[in-house]
Amino acid sequence: MTLFRHDSHCPAARSVRAATPRSDGGFTAIEVLIVALVLSVLAAMAIPFTSNTLALFRVGGDSRALVNGVSMSKMRAASDFTKARFYVDIAARSFRVEVWQKTAPQQWVQEGGTTWLSQNDNFSFGNAGTPPPDAVNPIAQAAACLDAANNALANTACIVFNSRGIPVDPLGAPVASDLYITDGTTIFGVSVSASGQVRLWRASASGQPIWTQQ
């Protein structure tokens, strides 16, 4: 009787092995393609979400910098027994703290550095038609800054504090003032009451704004 002997060197055996699918834990081209497709879909969904989150982080950071700058101006006025102001250059998208020099020559002197808004952020309240609950109505940026001769400076906004830390107008009377920034999606408002209380507000830039205190 003739027995069949499996010979690994036999061409027929090699052919059988070649036709048998391998099961060595690897991935087929179709499996790799499916995984790549799923990852592409997830990336397409995540990128807009990440971009919106980063944009909110930037404009939120700028709003907190505004609050800090306004608070610093208030503190400097009280500590130096003089006037101090938070100076905003709307066109340049920058802001700084200035203190009134009482000795000659009397003038506004910058303290510290100048800070610029993040990319895509601007001093604006967009299409918002109503201000936060305790802000000046109608909605508007703070009054223009004045030079040493009391001339208004174009494209500026200033909140001036007297030596008691109270926001005042050019005649020295207490006055409420507000500042707004937006990236086109979110609006932040910094409101300063006539008593000097500083609040931060946030609203969506689309539709009628619903302001929430931050």
Image (spheres, rainbow, N blue to C red):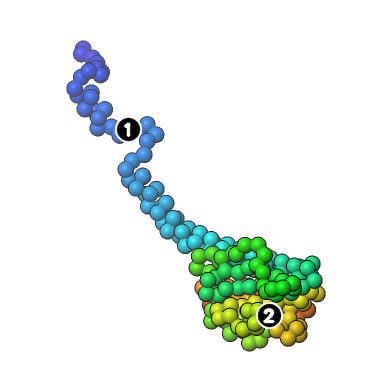
Q: Quadrant of the C terminus?
A: bottom right
In-image side of 15 versus 169 (left or right): left
User: Disc 1 marks which amino acid?
Assistant: Arg
Q: Please give the name of the residue rendered at 75% of the width and 67% of the height, measured from the top-left corner.
A: 76
Furthest toward the front, the residue is 104
The spot of residue 18 in percent (x, y) is: 25, 30
In this orientation, which residue lies closer to the viewer: 53 or 118? 118
Tell me the quarter of the picture where residue 114 sits.
bottom right
In the figure, 49 relative to 153: above or below?
Answer: above
Furthest toward the top, the residue is 1
In-image side of 57 versus 134 (left or right): left
Q: Quadrant of the N terminus?
A: top left
Q: Give the residue pinned by disc 1.
A: 22
Q: Give the residue pinned by disc 2.
A: 177
Whether residue 69 is visible to the viewer of this picture, yes or no, is yes
The spot of residue 182 in percent (x, y) is: 55, 72
In the figure, 19 relative to 72: above or below?
Answer: above
In this orientation, which residue lies closer to the viewer: 9 or 209? 209
Tell me the quarter of the picture where residue 22 sits.
top left
User: Disc 2 marks which amino acid?
Assistant: Ser
In-image side of 52 versus 197 (left or right): left
In this orientation, which residue lies closer to the viewer: 101 or 27? 101
In the figure, 29 relative to 162: above or below?
Answer: above
Count of all numbered marks drawn on residues in the image? 2
The spot of residue 44 in percent (x, y) is: 42, 58
